[in-house]
Amino acid sequence: MPNRPGPDFKRAIFFPQQGLVPKLVWVECKLSADDEYDPSKDILKLKPVLGNAVAEPLLGGATSRPLFVKHKFLPHRHSSAPVHLYHHEDYTFSDFGLNHCIYAVANGKPAHVWRGPVVALRMQEKNAALYDDFTLKDFRDIVNFIKNFKGSWATYNLESPSLRPKLKGVRINCEADIMTLRQKYLAIDVPPDHPVFLAEPSSISTLIGKAVQVYRYPSAEAWEDKSLNGVGPYDNQSATFLHMVTDPKDYKWGFAPMRYQNRTGSVVVVREDRTSISPAEIEQLCDFCQYKMQPMFEDASQAEDFDRSSAEVLAFMTPQNYARYVKDEHKSGSSG
């Protein structure tokens, strides 16, 4: 293994899709700035490791998500530090072939269907937001994990990934990804174990009877420090307005949490009830938040009697009023 390229690089273990032997690699873990809303954390540069040959058309880069190595799968862990396994987003997994390296490590019998390249990183024991060098003890834990982890895909035929049940969701693209994908709202297939289903539903959507959950994609590294005609590459106003806070007692009332104002990026949206949703439905919902509710929030915030005005705004967000809005917008669009 070559010498450490720099102080921001941490040792990781790489499981290539082709080949039978895992490799030690250096992964850049750049520390982000600390602020009032987001504590400092390591931002990974995984593109050189995971690549983007297959993910590029849909994800705009090496978008990935972590899989936590959980203690329940490892009753006799060798290391006490948390470990992350990073892989491409689930719904593109079927585009990859089987990971032969992982199958070799598990003696041909992993409990989970592993596809595409995978990289494992060790977290610091006292700060799970920062990474540390991978160790031999961590590797033993990873091997045990691979042999025992039964992901939700494990019951399906290894050669038939299309048999996995999927739900219809919508990807809302940020400004940079719109340049690549040419669409703001994109229909996608979402596997039932995607982390989006762990998200708290947006409050406006819940009040109007259309509860949706949202998951932010990691930002593509290719757009760092770039501006698109004065617009930030990670700006996503639709996702921002969808998350305006509706509790009048919250100081952020009428505004989205900072994570949906700063570098929001592209997001995936699903219904909380796990039924399918279309791009047109999500576009209607986002337009309602941005063009109907946001002006009402703004007017109420400037009113002399805020308590009364905010209560009126809250009372307006009902299934009946939303249905009326959709009907009126449809008539307006048809007449135009």
Image (cartoon, rainbow, N blue to C red):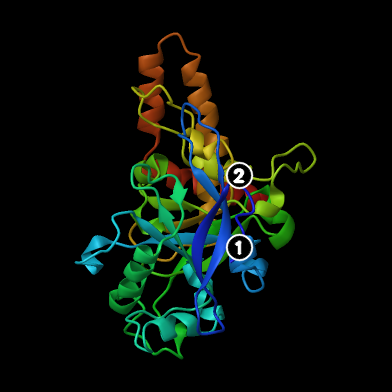
Identify the residue at the far right of this view.
Answer: 229
Query: Which dot marks residue 102?
Result: none
Q: Position of residue 181 (x, y in %)?
A: 69, 62
The Cα atoms of the two marked residues, 2 and 1, are separated by 19 Å
Q: Secondary structure at mark 2?
A: loop
Q: Amino acid at mark 1?
A: Ala
According to the picture, the residue beneath numbered tag 1 turns out to be 62
Residue 32 seen in render: yes
Picture residue at 40% right of the left edge, 80% below the top: 164
Picture residue at 48% right of the left edge, 18% below the top: 301
Q: Position of residue 219 (x, y in %)?
A: 59, 51
Q: Amino acid at mark 2?
A: Asn
Residue 151 seen in render: no
Picture residue at 35% right of the left edge, 47% below the top: 200
| Quarter occupied by residue 105 | bottom left
Q: Secondary structure at mark 1?
A: loop
Q: Position of residue 281 (x, y in %)?
A: 51, 56
Compared to residue 195, the image places residue 303 above or below, namely above
Compared to residue 182, the image places residue 97 above or below, namely below
Identify the residue at the far left of this view.
Answer: 75
Q: Position of residue 49 (x, y in %)?
A: 60, 66
Taking depth in this image into account, of 50 and 91 the one nearest to the observer is 50
Q: Say whether disc 2 or disc 1 marks the residue closer to the N-terminus.
A: 1
Taking depth in this image into account, of 241 and 18 the one nearest to the observer is 18
Please state, as top left, top right, bottom left or bottom right, where the N terminus lies in the image: bottom right
Compared to residue 178, the image places residue 112 above or below, namely below
According to the picture, the residue beneath numbered tag 2 turns out to be 236
Identify the residue at the far top of this view.
Answer: 304
Instruction: Answer few, some or many: residues within 10 Å of disc 2's Cα (few below 14, many 20 plus, some between 14 and 19).
Output: many
Instruction: Answer few, some or many: residues within 10 Å of disc 1's Cα (few below 14, many 20 plus, some between 14 and 19).
Output: many
Left or right: 334, with 282 as reference point: right
